[in-house]
Amino acid sequence: MATTNEMKNFISKDQMQITIFPLEIIIEILSRLPVKSLFKFKCVSKSWLSLISSSHFAKSHLKISSRNNKFSHKNLLLLSMYLPHTLCSCPLYSALHEKTISCINKLNFPWNPSNIIAGVSLCNGLFLICIGMYNNNLFLWNPSTRKTKKLPFSGNEYSRCDVTYGFGYDESNDDYKVVEINGVYGIHYVYGANLKIYSLKSNSWRRMKKYGDALFSPDSAVFVNGSLHWAVAHNDGVSTFWDTVSLNLENEQFGNLSLPNYDPGKCNGSSSRQLGDSSDFEPGILNWALGKLGDCLCLFCDYYKVKLDVWVMKDYKAKGSWTKSVSLPYTTGIGPRISPLWISDNGEVLLHDGSHVMVYDASKDEYKRVEIHEMDDNGVGAATVYAESLVSPDLDGTANTPELILY
């Protein structure tokens, strides 16, 4: 977290004397406020404008908002199912505790709402979004500040069906990075995919060394603990097996994570075994995907039309740290695919079932649908939880959206 002394450098001594409160107290208070309030408070004085606009303050505010478990800085982003898209946000607390969400914030698109959103990744309140079906339309977007940046073309003409992305933060170099992988599972079945990496600091792409023995899942990478994570298939010449590959964004070195054991039970009559056998992906048996809940890496194990188990890695990379958190049953009225979004302290699970936002109460073993009137006609096509942030998608501060926000 940025120190108070570092942030003092942005404020002159005469500006500090505007208020009777010590600067340290002002910084502590402002760091805990929502982005909407902070943008209003930029008009209070030049000193507050300098403070709130500084990158040091943005980092301090992000650290507090990310670790705040009282939901005050957590929002739910909602995308309508059909074109032209509608984009809204609402407080996470409302989604968990209100049957009908009344506090909806409709967002303006920084792109044409009639275009398909083909891929989304999230880090520190910033979204990496692929618009359309080709990889030369990548945007970084902060829904809290409404600022956007279009990334330069990587130089490779891939269909979105042939490529997957990862997006994360390299804290040691204070840089945001995007990884583009051409050659994914289910498309061309290419082992030894081509990789490129983009640096926001340099605003440029460069080629990475191939990861030779893996076939990457088409799902976007999950960013946890400074690393990106993909589900990948390996082939040793005899059989195919699956595991999780990680990419450390600081040193750009690959690693592997072990998977938990699971009990197929009545799904196929087998005894307990480790995830990773290629037969796990046969329709009607089991499909698994990586995800993130809070700050933890997760595995979502979907037993076709039976249940979805949520495994959480409580202690990153520690042996035996996978813990089954909850099982979500497929019942009448639940859509074809359960996607957990958040697990509250009392065990309630906020989820998206393909067209609606739902809350599952494990103690009562029941679902309740969250009514969102702005989405009733089109349905909810996608949903994700994010923490508000002041992080700019342009490190040089020249983002292409006006800074003044009218809420």
Image (spheres, rainbow, N blue to C red):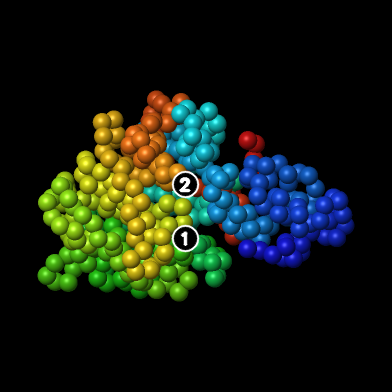
Q: Which mark is residue 345?
A: 2
Q: Secondary structure at mark 2?
A: loop
- At 55% from the left edge and 54% from the top edge, which residue is drawn? 67
Residue pictured at 71% horizontal, 54% vertical? 28
**Residue 68's x, y, as percent?**
57, 51
Q: Is residue 348 left or right of residue 140?
A: left
Q: Earlier in the sequence, mark 1 or mark 2?
A: 1
Which residue lies under the disc numbered 1?
Answer: 168
Mark 1 secondary-structure assignment = strand
- Is residue 394 something that shows in the picture? yes
Quick check: can you spot residue 156? no
Residue in the picture at 65% in, 49% down: 32
Q: Where's residue 362, x and y in %?
A: 36, 40
Is 393 on the left or on the right of 246, as rendered?
right
Q: Nearer the viewer, residue 9 or 29?
A: 29
Q: Splitting the image into 4 quarters, where does residue 182 fall?
A: bottom left
